[in-house]
Image (cartoon, rainbow, N blue to C red):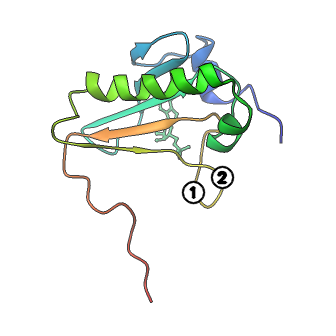
Amino acid sequence: MAYDDTNIFARILRGEIPAKTVYEDEHALAFHDINPQAPQHILVIPKGPYQSMDDFTAHAPDALIAGFFKAVGHVARQMGATETGYRILANHGADAHQEVPHLHIHIFAGRPLGPMLTPMKD
Ligand code: AMP
């Protein structure tokens, strides 16, 4: 499936709609999630047309992959979350309930975050 450049994060990257930006460099843009699930909930997106973690790691140039993940770490430090802890999460595809088809890493922090997933029933 081709990258859909009308998705909301592509539009944020092009400056067509606003975002509460907390960090930007040549590889990545980070901004507040519009519907936060934790006291701190930041999204980090790469500056390139990649639908998800799968597309990004298969097709993005090494310099962008390295720069993007360095930006994720930088933003977590900027949030002041390294002492108390934080969680990063990236959804790919239907089973993971990915809503926006542009790779985004969620960074959650600011409270105890509970178990990683709802435990499976036997
Ligand atoms: P996912 O389910 O991993 O695709 O998550 C998509 C995330 O994007 C959700 O947490 C939404 O709250 C968030 N979101 C959707 N539209 C916007 C927007 N315009 N600005 C910031 N966050 C958004």
Q: Residues within 10 Å of mark 2 (few under 14, many from 20)?
A: some
Viewer-proximal residue among 90 and 94 = 90
- Amino acid type for the residue under numbered disc 2: Gly
Placement of 32 over or under 53, stated as above or below: above
Viewer-proximal residue among 62 and 4 = 62
- Amino acid type for the residue under numbered disc 1: Ala
Q: Position of residue 87 (x, y in %)?
A: 34, 45
Q: Which mark is residue 40?
A: none
Return the residue at label 2: 93
Q: Position of residue 28 (x, y in %)?
A: 52, 19
Secondary structure of the residue carrying tag 1 is loop
In the image, is the residue at mark 1 within 8 Å of ligand 1 by its beta carbon?
yes
Q: Quadrant of residue 107?
A: top left
Residue drawn 46% across and 19% down?
A: 19
Figure quadrant of the C terminus: bottom left
Secondary structure of the residue carrying tag 2 is loop
Return the residue at label 1: 96
Q: Is residue 56 left or right of residue 43?
A: right
Q: Answer whether labels 2 and 1 touch (C-beta < 8 Å).
A: yes
Q: Quadrant of residue 81?
A: top left
Q: Is residue 17 left or right of residue 20?
A: right
